[in-house]
Image (cartoon, rainbow, N blue to C red):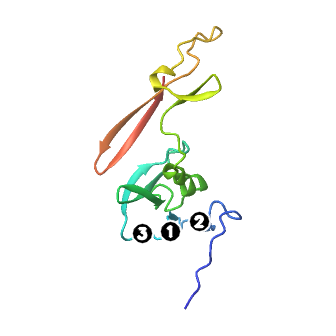
Amino acid sequence: MEMKRQLDRIAEPWGTRTPYGPGEEWPVRVDMHLEHGADPQAVRWVETASILHSNGDALEIAVEQGRMVGVGRSRVNHGRLGPKDLYGWQANGSRDRVTQPLVRRDGELVAEAANELTITEWDPGSKQPLFKAGAVQVTRVGESCHAQTGAG
């Protein structure tokens, strides 16, 4: 029986190199990180865009009984996931995760509506809002969605 080598993501944060020569196809590799006990064959895989960085990456989220139990299978990077995508999802299930905006008032954190936190001041030098907003338009194309972004 062949032993599978345990990947050391500290020594190799981007995973094992998969070199290929001129004219060869980039080899597919399936990076995946699931909660202990989650079966990759039994979970429902949901395609999504990566929100932890802005390089146009995508991945699939493993869902079991309505909650996120892992990630894997990037369709953009031939199955490869970087450290943020591979491990960053775990914060979503944390009991101490902040689920609403908080502001500090008199030394205490107090819940505040997001629209109350919007800055309405203008920078006197550039005559621009102090915080800029972004817009996204999602268009369904066949079985996948493509997002177009624009800064406003």
Q: In the rendered structure, which disc, 2 or 1, sits on the residue that comes first in sequence?
A: 2
SS type, badge 1: loop
Q: Nearer the viewer, mark 2 or mark 1?
A: 1
Q: Residue 40: give its label.
A: 3
Q: Name the residue beneath numbered marker 1.
A: 36
Question: Which residue is located at x 48 percent, y 39 percent?
Answer: 99
Give the amino acid at mark 3.
Answer: Pro
Q: Residues within 10 Å of mark 1 (few under 14, many from 20)?
A: few
Q: Are marks 3 and 2 in contact (CB under 8 Å)?
A: no
The image quadrant that residue 55 belongs to is top right
Give the amino acid at mark 2.
Answer: Pro
Q: Is residue 56 left or right of residue 63?
A: right
Q: Is residue 77 left or right of residue 6?
A: left
SS type, badge 3: loop
C-alpha distance separating marks 3 and 2: 34 Å
Q: Nearer the viewer, mark 3 or mark 2?
A: 3
C-alpha distance separating marks 2 and 1: 39 Å
Q: Quadrant of the N terminus?
A: bottom right
Examine the rendered structure and indicate whether residue 120 appears above or below residue 71: above
Question: Which residue is located at x 41 percent, y 50 percent?
Answer: 48
Question: Percent from the top left, x then y, of residue 64?
Answer: 37, 61
Q: In the rendered structure, which disc, 3 or 2, sits on the residue that comes first in sequence?
A: 2
Q: Nearer the viewer, residue 147 or 2?
A: 2
Q: Residues within 10 Å of mark 3 (few under 14, many from 20)?
A: some
Question: Which residue is located at x 63 percent, y 8 percent?
Answer: 124
Q: Nearer the viewer, residue 89 or 143?
A: 89
Q: Residues within 10 Å of mark 2 (few under 14, many from 20)?
A: few
Q: Name the residue beneath numbered marker 2.
A: 22
Question: Which residue is located at x 54 percent, y 50 percent?
Answer: 91
Q: Nearer the viewer, residue 26 or 22?
A: 26
